[in-house]
Image (tube, rainbow, N blue to C red):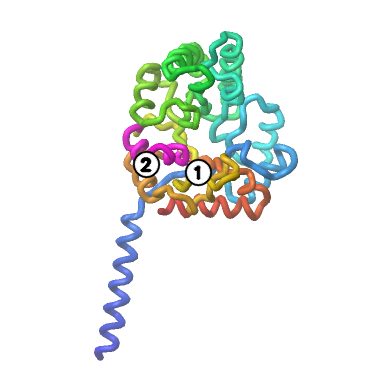
Amino acid sequence: MNRRSFLTITIAGTAAAAFRTSVLAAPNRKLRKAIMYSTIGVKGSVLEKYRVMKEAGFEGVEPMGGMNREEVLAALRDTGLQAASVCCHTHWENPLSAPDEATRKIGFDGLVQSLQDAKTYGATSVLLVPGVARDGVTYQQCFERSIVEIKKAIPVASDAGVRIAIENVGNNFIMSPEQAIAYLDAINSEWVGWHFDIGNAGRVGPAERWIQLLGKRIVKIHVKDFSAKPAAPGAHTGGRPKLLDGDTNWPAVMKALDDAGYSGWAISEQPTDQASDLESARDLARRMDKIFAS
C-alpha cells in the first residue's frame, strides 16, 4: 500500500468514526411540532388554516378555548392534526385575579369550558395565565385569588383527564422559577403543572435555568425567541425575532429539556406574519427542526 492510499483510508476511517460518535452522542429527542391557533396568519376558515399548517410540516395545533367544537373537530379529522393543548380564552380580559367576583366567575367559567374543549379534542392540558398583577392588583392578591379559583377547577380537570398548565407571561406575576415552584407547591395538585414559555423566560433570566428548576413540572412548552436588545423607538412591543434570529441559547435550552426528560409537544407562538402562508409556515417549521437538532 502506498502512502497516498494509506492516508486516504486513514482519513476516511477517522471521518466515519467521528460521524458514528456524533450520531451516538446526538440526543433521541421526541418533540412534536405544533402551532398556537391564534398565531396562524393564514386567512380563511379553521379547516383552511389547518390544511396549510399540515402541509407546512406541523403535527398539531393549540386551539383556543371557546371555539366552535364541531368546526375544530372536523378540521382535526380532515387534516390528521392533533390538539396539542388548548389555550384558555378568558384569562387576559377576565383574569382569576380580578378584584370583583363577577369577573373572576367569567374567568373560571372560561377555564372550565377550555378543560371540556380539551377533553373533546383529545388534548391533555389547558394553558392558563393565572392572573395579572397590575392595575391595583398586588402580587400577593394575584397569588391568593387565582389559587382559590384554580383549586375550584381541579375536580373538573380530574374528571376530564386534562391538566391545567400555568404559563409564564408578561403579567407582572411569577418572574422567576423559584416563584413558579412556590406557586405550584401552594396549589399542590397533580392536575396542575407548568406550560413553559421559552421566549418569555428569556426576558427575565436564562430559559435553561427555569427548565433546570421546574423539571418534571413542565407539561408543555411554547417555542419562541426573544431579543435582549432594547426595542427601537416606535416599534411594536409585541414584535419578536424569528426563531434562531434572537438571543435564546437553544443548545442550552435543548440540553436542559433533555436533562428534565421532556418529550412531546413543542408549540410555536411566533407572530402571525411568520405563518401567514405556506412558505412562511414552512420556514417556521424548518427553524423549529433546527432548534430540536441543536
What amino acid is at disc 1? Lys
Which residue lies at the image location 58% right of the left edge and 50% below the top edge? 57
Within 10 Å of disc 1 (Cα), the crowding (few <14, some 14-19, many 20+) is many
Which residue lies at the image location 56% right of the left edge and 15% below the top edge? 108
Q: Tell me how many marks there are.
A: 2
Q: Quadrant of residue 101?
A: top right
Residue nearest the observer in this picture, 97 or 236 = 236
Q: Is residue 59 visible?
A: no
Within 10 Å of disc 2 (Cα), the crowding (few <14, some 14-19, many 20+) is some
Task: Give the residue furthest to the right.
Answer: 44
| Start-end of magenta stretch | 198-214
Q: Is residue 38 visible?
A: yes
Q: Is residue 111 above or below residue 205?
A: above
Q: Quadrant of residue 180?
A: top left
Residue corresponding to mark 1: 224
Residue nearest the observer in this picture, 245 or 5 = 245
Q: Is residue 232 magenta?
A: no
Q: Dot 1: what SS?
A: loop
Q: Is there CB contact under 8 Å for labels 2 and 1? A: no
